[in-house]
Image (cartoon, rainbow, N blue to C red):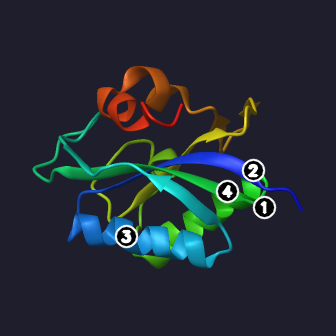
């Protein structure tokens, strides 16, 4: 089974944000994925919604045997398991979250479905905090 190189962004703005990200990374690893690199933590203001809670974010490079949709289902399960109740795609807008995990790149794949877009253009080209985190990964 081949390994796929994937770049993820993780963020949290509720509770102990750094701990939330560390727990999510542990769950990603426990799911049979190899975490090969993580960025420094970056503290940022919320983007595209108003909140008094600041975000802690990181980028991570992993190697996985999962397909893009399998990986999406896997990380969405981690979000729910950690207590995330609202998905921004389903709810139509952004809100505070315990954990958010986005697939930014998956090998050199270009993929678009109702649930997933790879590469994640908004993070690659529009969000300044993402560009800072991804500079060593892209």
In the rendered image, which residue does mark 3 sit on? 22
Task: Residue under label 4, please give it.
Answer: 63
Tell which circle, 4 or 2, labels the residue nearer the N-terminal end: 2
| 91 relative position to 36: left or right | left
Pointer 2: residues within 10 angstroms few (<14), some, or many (20+)? some
Q: Number of labelled discs?
A: 4
- Rounded to the nearest whole Å, what is the CA distance between mark 4 and mark 1? 7 Å
Instruction: Look at 42% across and 30% down and name the residue there.
Output: 135
Is disc 1 surrounded by few (<14), some (14 to 19) or many (20+) residues within 10 Å? some
Mark 2, secondary structure of its residue: strand
- Give the labeled residue for mark 1: 65
Q: Nearer the viewer, mark 3 or mark 4?
A: 4
Q: Which residue is mark 2?
A: 4
Q: Earlier in the sequence, mark 3 or mark 4?
A: 3
Q: Residues within 10 Å of mark 3 (few under 14, many from 20)?
A: few
Marks 3 and 4, Cα distance to the nearest angstrom?
A: 17 Å
């Amino acid at each position: 089974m081949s390994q796929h190189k994937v770049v993820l962004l993780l963020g949290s703005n509720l509770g102990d944000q750094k701990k939330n990200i560390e727990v999510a990374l542990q769950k990603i690893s426990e799911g049979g994925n190899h975490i090969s690199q993580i960025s420094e933590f970056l503290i940022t203001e919320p983007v595209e919604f108003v909140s008094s809670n600041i975000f802690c974010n990181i980028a991570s490079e992993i190697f996985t045997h999962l397909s893009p949709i399998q990986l999406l289902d896997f990380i969405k399960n981690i979000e729910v398991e950690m207590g995330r109740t609202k998905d921004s795609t389903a709810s139509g807008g952004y809100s505070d979250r315990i954990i958010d995990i986005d697939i930014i790149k998956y090998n050199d794949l270009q993929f678009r479905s109702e649930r997933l877009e790879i590469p994640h253009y908004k993070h690659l080209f529009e969000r300044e905090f993402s560009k800072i985190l991804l500079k060593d990964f892209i």
